[in-house]
Image (tube, rainbow, N blue to C red):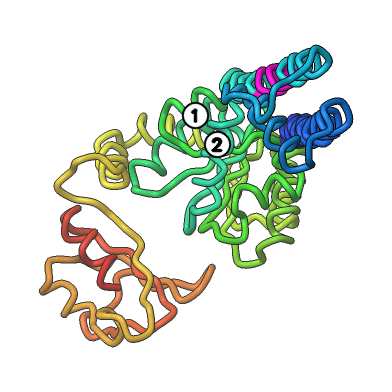
Amino acid sequence: MATSERYRSLGGRTARVTVRHVRLLLVAAVGAVVVGTAGFVLLEGWSIEDGLYQTVTTLTTVGFREVHELDQAGRYWAMAVALAGVAIIFGSIGIVSEYLVDEVASGRREARAMMRTVEAATDHFILCGYGRVGAAVARELSHAGSAVVVVDTDEASRDEAAAQGHMIVPGDATEDHTLELAGVRRARGLVASVDTDSENVFIVLSARQLNPNLFIVARANAAEAEAKLLRAGANRVVSPYGTAGRRIAELAIRPRVTDFIDAALSHGDLAFSIEEVPVAAGSWLDGRTVGELRDEGFFTLAVFLGEERHEVQPAEDRAFAAGESIVVTGSAEGLRALSARS
């Protein structure tokens, strides 16, 4: 059974047990009132109203005086009713205590609070797999100011992700229900970073089916998996080993250039940065030119007209249009303000 299903099963079973116990206590309480009243009516010859009053005050251990003097049989009956009341009261306390202890010990209360937080999340990233690669991805996304929902089957990985301040969804990311719990229809993007290529392919397939507009980045361990992930619906595929090899080569050939680009693309407290900024219809950027943007302190490196078409070093009089994206460099603070205005 998957982790998410097991969690729902345990929670549902606890709820059913608690409801059953409450129903039994209610039946016992009503039965005690009815039987107790009948006993006083039959044994003492009282009216139903007097018998009901005496039964309720005795069951609740209030301790008021008897409505009428009791004979020996009536006293024995009153003691039996009082004992039944004590049993019902302590039974209720026991069930409530057991429920509260079980909630705290099992962590279900914290899990429900986490799920409420996830349900309220929008425009977030879903990270499937919180290993060494996934942890690095989550760290960079957090530095960029993006909320991250981590999906993982390993409890230790989830605990580590929670300790870093990320939202958590337990379960198998290849299952549609788990992705639904993670808010795949409201998410900005998804990163498939599980250790096995087959699982990443299933994750991409499921996510693409649930949200056709989702931006998906997938990890490929084997070279032949890259084409499969792209066919499954990934927008970008990254091989950690290939990327590491290219980075090592770049550092060996042009270390200063590589350090400069890495610094510009990081999300630390830097004076400059490089960002991709979309041009929204009616925004401040819509209709502006490269020259006007340069006067604001930003240098346009490229203009993207789609997934593959782009212009490098556009002319000064080149105007931006809605639906395009521009790659610009400038001060980190200024780029944050520019993104807010776009």
Residue under circle 2? 168
In the rendered view of the protein, which quadrant contains the C terminus?
bottom left
Image location (x, y in percent) of residue 290: 23, 77
In three-dimensional space, the C-alpha distance between marks 2 and 1, rounded to whole angstroms, equals 7 Å
Within-10-Å neighbours for mark 1: few <14, some 14–19, many 20+:
many
Q: Amino acid at mark 2?
A: Ile
Mark 2: give few (<14), some (14-19) or many (20+) Cα within 10 Å. many
Residue most toward the right? 42
Task: Tell me if 195 is positioned left or right of 334 in this view.
Answer: right
- In the image shown, does 335 or 68 lie closer to the viewer? 68
Of the numbered discs 2 and 1, the one sitting upstream in the chain is 1
Discs 2/1, front: 2
Q: Residue at x 17, y 55 (%)?
A: 333
**Residue at the (24%, 51%) spot, across then down:** 273
Q: As rendered, which of 312 and 41 lies closer to the eye?
A: 41
Is the Cβ of the residue at disc 2 closer than 8 Å to that at disc 1?
Answer: yes
Q: Position of residue 218 (x, y in %)?
A: 62, 46
Residue that badge 1 annotates: 161
Q: Which residues are magenta?
A: 84-92
Relative to 305, residue 186 above or below? above
